[in-house]
Amino acid sequence: MSENIRMDLLSTEEVNNIYEKCFLILSEKGVKVDHEEGLKFLSAHGAHVDNTSHVVKFPRDIVEKALASVPHEATLTGGIVIPDNSGKLYANTETGANNYIDPETNIRHSMTIEFDRLWAQLVEQLDEISICAYQSPTDVPTKTADIHGLKTLLENTSKHIMVHPYSLNSLNYLFELGLVVAGSKEEYKKKPRFNFICCSQAPLVFKEMDYEAIKLSCEYGQIVLPASLTTAGATCPVTIAGQITQVGVEILAMIVFSQLIEKGTPVIGNPFSFALNMSTGRNLLGSVEAVLSEAACCEFIKKAFNIPVGQNGFGSDSHITDGQSTFEEAFMGLFGAFTIPDFLIGAGALSTILCVSPTKLIIDAKGLNILNRARAGIKVSEETIALDEIINIQQGGHYLENKHTLKHCREAIRVPLFNTDTYDTWVADGSKDMHTRATETYMELKKNCKPLDLDEHIKKELNNIVKSADKNLSE
């Protein structure tokens, strides 16, 4: 039975080779940690710390103990456990876009709180999207945009939320928002509504904010999501193998941080592997090199560290939903389906994640069904071989009325956005392309967009936290 098709980009020998290089780099070169309290903590737990340069080196035994204690799975809001036992892929939206394409006018706007609100309400209705991230609203104070963004999502979607904090000072406000919705810290730790994306500053630096985010995540019982944002030829080696190695070092360092702070904290690896367009200086995620590197980084992290991983699977460098975006997301998506990530990132994203489109979000959501079907592979059994049906069929006959056909004919994936009609029927229906059909789907979903039914005291407390943040951080 060839269920759950897999494609290996790296051999066992290559994974082991890179794995050993990660240990070598962490123990002999180390990483820079710009967090005074963190330096003292790491030193007290066996790391070699240079208090002048802030470089931290980890002996091999510390790293191996961290890998031994990190869980091999993580639970998201709604009881979603990754990796899924059946091999199912989950999907989430990209974070941080500051532009938004309005499907009703097809005009690109700066992101606003209202667009963020509509985005969350749309995600709430798409069963295929399990994780939602806020975008970057431009109509609120810059220093508290992440706080406004999280509040907006907590009010408008019940799904798991991924949070990318914008500053050290906003971290406690973000947790306060989560505690209000949960009711208490104890309840929050049982079912965290969100997790932080904690990023390295490539190459090999960890900012005060990101170390603090890992520390607080461990304290509050959250999943830690270490992200390594590397650009080949700029902030990491230009070769794919070199990029994998640096990504591995940076994510491994964050695994060690988390397990030293709170043993058993769940971790989801999240490489963001970009390629540099040397002629323009623009980051690319849809180029073949970027896609190969992203998939290979995820494969390495999964095999070497045995933790869940997320992979870019829907984004595009194109600025509109067109042939380029369709090809790039299909290319990325198939690598996601046939390699080993647990969820795909970037649903609805364009312009190398600087813009989002609800129309593309809907296309990506429906496309996930195809990817999961492809990933499930082919079932070969006595039932599916259908030997009796073939033996009993009259030569030149048909299977249309066969009980076996009737039993299995509804198993095929059908995507409503795809045109499967005859040409004449398609013309009679208005000659609509997929973008048009997706926009019509958006218009229908928009009719049902509404905020969550939260208690009034919760809404009031959320507003008070945001007002306090605006006053204390922006004035």
Image (cartoon, grey):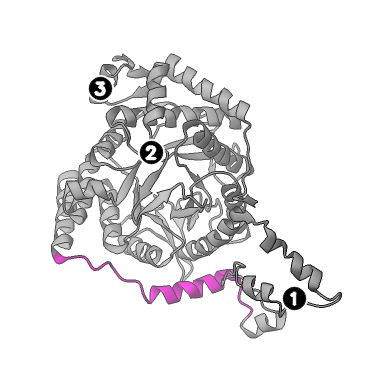
Up-down: is 150 above or below 248? Answer: below
User: For this view, does 171 lie left or right of residue 311?
Assistant: left
Q: Nearer the viewer, mark 2 or mark 1?
A: 1
**Residue 399: image tag:** 1
Label 2 to label 3, Cα distance in Å?
20 Å
Q: Is residue 455 magenta?
A: yes
Write the residue at 28% across / 68% down: 451
Q: Nearer the viewer, mark 2 or mark 3?
A: 2
SS type, badge 3: helix
**Residue 41: image tag:** 3
SS type, badge 1: loop
Question: Disc 2 designates what residue?
Answer: 267
Label 2 to label 1, Cα distance in Å?
50 Å
Q: Position of residue 134 (x, y in %)?
A: 35, 54
Label 1: how many residues lie within 10 Å, few (<14), some (14-19) or many (20+)? few
Kindly identify the amino acid type of the residue bearing the numbered disc 3: Phe
- Residue interval drawn in magenta: 431-456
Mark 3–mark 1 CB contact (< 8 Å) = no
